[in-house]
Image (cartoon, grey):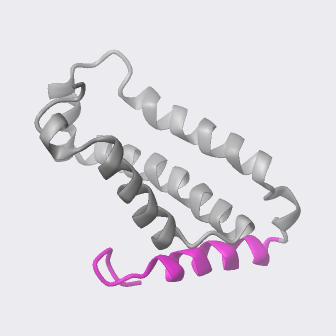
Amino acid sequence: MKGSSKTTVQELKDLVKDFITKRKWEGFHNPKDLAEAICIESAELLEIFQWIAPEEAMSWRNVPSRLRHIKDELADVFIYCLSMANVMDIDITEAVKSKIKQNEVKYPVEKYYGRAHP
C-alpha cells in the first residue's frame, strides 16, 4: 500500500470496509457501537501518556517500541472513524474541510495566534 501522501481517504475507507465485509461484521458496526469503540480506543491512546510530562511524550518519537504502541492505538481510532464514515455515508474530505471553515470563524487568527484562549 502507498504511503500517506499517496493514499486517498477513499482507499482507506474501502480497505476498512473490505476487512469488515470479509468477516461479516457489518451487523456490529452501527453508529452507537462505533462511537463507543472510538471513545474506548481513544482512551487506550490517552492511557499511553498518563502521568508523563509533555516533553517525555515528545521524546517517544525516537523510541521504536513506544512509537509502535502509539501508532497501533492511533490506527485503531482511525479505523473506527473510517468505519463510522462508511456506515453513515460521510465524505471525510468534505467533513474536515467544512469543520476547518467553521473553526476559522470560531477561532480567528488575530485572536488566537499563539494562544489556546483569547
Q: Where is residue 115? Give x, y as percent.
A: 16, 30
Q: Residue furthest top?
A: 51
Q: Residue furthest right?
A: 27
Residue 58: say if magenta. no
4 versus 102 height, above or below: below
Q: Where is residue 10? Give x, y as percent.
A: 52, 81
Residue 22: say if magenta. yes
Depth check: 92 or 5 in front? Answer: 92
Depth check: 10 or 72 in front? Answer: 10
Residue found 36% across the figure and 57% down from its top: 100
Classified by dominant secondary structure, the portion drawn in magenta counts as helix
Depth check: 48 or 101 in front? Answer: 101
Residue found 85% across the figure and 71% down from its top: 24
Q: Is residue 79 left or right of residue 66?
A: right
Q: Where is residue 93? Give x, y as percent.
A: 46, 72
- In the image, the segment drawn in magenta is 1-23
108 versus 24 height, above or below: above
Quadrant of residue 41 within the rendered picture: top right
Q: Is residue 11 left or right of residue 55?
A: right
Residue found 40% across the figure and 66% down from its top: 97
- Counting labels gives 0
Q: Is residue 84 left or right of residue 69?
A: right
Residue found 37% across the figure and 44% down from its top: 70
Q: Where is residue 69? Give x, y as percent.
A: 40, 44
Q: Is residue 33 left or right of residue 52?
A: right
Quadrant of residue 14 within the rendered picture: bottom right
**Quadrant in the picture for the C terminus:** top left
**Quadrant in the picture for the N terminus:** bottom left
